[in-house]
Amino acid sequence: MATINNDNNNNLEIIKKLLSPKEFRKCDIIFNGDKKFKNEWNCFTNQSSWIQFFNDILLLCNEIRSAVLIDYNVPEWKELCEFLNHIKSNPILIKILPQLSNIKLIYLDDFLFFLINNKSLIDRSEIDINNSFSNYLFIDVSLHNSSPIICNDNLSLHKNLLLNLISILKLNNNNDNLNFNFNLNEFSNELNLKNIYFPILSGWLCEYPIIYCNSGNFKNCGLINYENVNQQDLENNNLCGIDLIKVEVQLNKPFNNDILKIQSIQRVCAFTFPLNLNFLENNSNNNNQKENEPLQLINYEKRIKERFNNNDNNNLNFKELWNDISFLKQTISMATIRL
């Protein structure tokens, strides 16, 4: 028993060192000066980028999330794939993080890279298929509507799009190459990438309970015949200047307050929903809903907290690094909003 405890303590110290703004460069199990990764070292010696990247890997390995959007500085796609594969080949980290082999990358475009736990994402997709994607509320934000509206009439179109994505993920789930990463441009025909609204794909990957769709200049979110849509119709939306609720999932009580110097390190994810939509009417069967909040958000909050408190997955205990998680909500209004 003492040996196991010593191993666990040693493992925890390695992870803490890799998350320390002052110490991570000294951790030679990753930053060993390998000339092959000279460009990556130059990128990740920026303490903010590395610690955000590694903290996201830990969130995924502990299955608190199944996919995260990379919104910080990282190497170009090819170099990033090579660097991630380098990390995944490290025997010390493999021992500490059994789920590390499941961590992969998804490329949607030059500004949309995702880190995923492939196993967790496939498991979540099975749940979504079985409950017909009821964990998500689609909201049409087309400028041709006077205000955001709940999208009910065209859900089958959004579901089919996501089913296509899931089929690609599943098809490649058994790829013998553990270093395989997903460049969705290679599946452009299957996904019809030229004609889809990217926030639907990125919203589902990130498990946002609110997913924005856009009917463009049509009366519905058909996701078809988009050759006739002015691109500006899809780039713009009717969220500008209206009251939104911003939901931010935040980690609290870190093992070392130095990590709080890293910008946005506490943020697990953030998303919005329109304040003035009547969600109570849409979720009229929920007698316990006291506020005008989407039922999907209420259930999402429960799922995230349950995952955070689950220490039975034989992984590193994430609560040794962050002791608490919270949901912060505030009303915001912005002149322009890019989705």
Image (cartoon, rainbow, N blue to C red):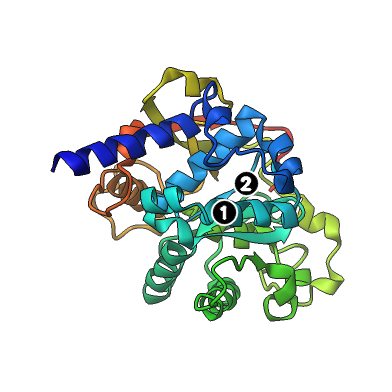
Q: Residues within 10 Å of mark 1 (few under 14, many from 20)?
A: many
Dot 1: what SS?
A: strand
**Residue type indicated by callout 2:** Ile
Tag of residue 115: 1
* Camera-nearest residue between 279 and 106: 106
In this picture, is 285 found above or below 20? below
Which callout, 2 or 1, points at the residue further toward the start of the chain? 2
Q: Position of residue 192 (x, y in %)?
A: 73, 76
For label 2, the residue is 70
Dot 2: what SS?
A: loop
Direction left: furthest residue: 1
Q: Position of residue 224 (x, y in %)?
A: 73, 76
The answer to the question of whether label 2 and label 1 lie on touching residues, with beta carbons closer than 8 A, is yes
- The answer for how far apart the CA atoms under marks 2 and 1 are is 7 Å
* Camera-nearest residue between 215 and 123: 123
Viewed as shown, does residue 220 lie left or right of 205? Answer: right
Q: Quadrant of the N terminus?
A: top left
Q: Position of residue 165 (x, y in %)?
A: 59, 73
Residue at point 54%, 71% (across, down): 155
Q: Position of residue 89 (x, y in %)?
A: 53, 56
* Camera-nearest residue between 121 and 84: 84
**Residue type indicated by callout 1:** Leu
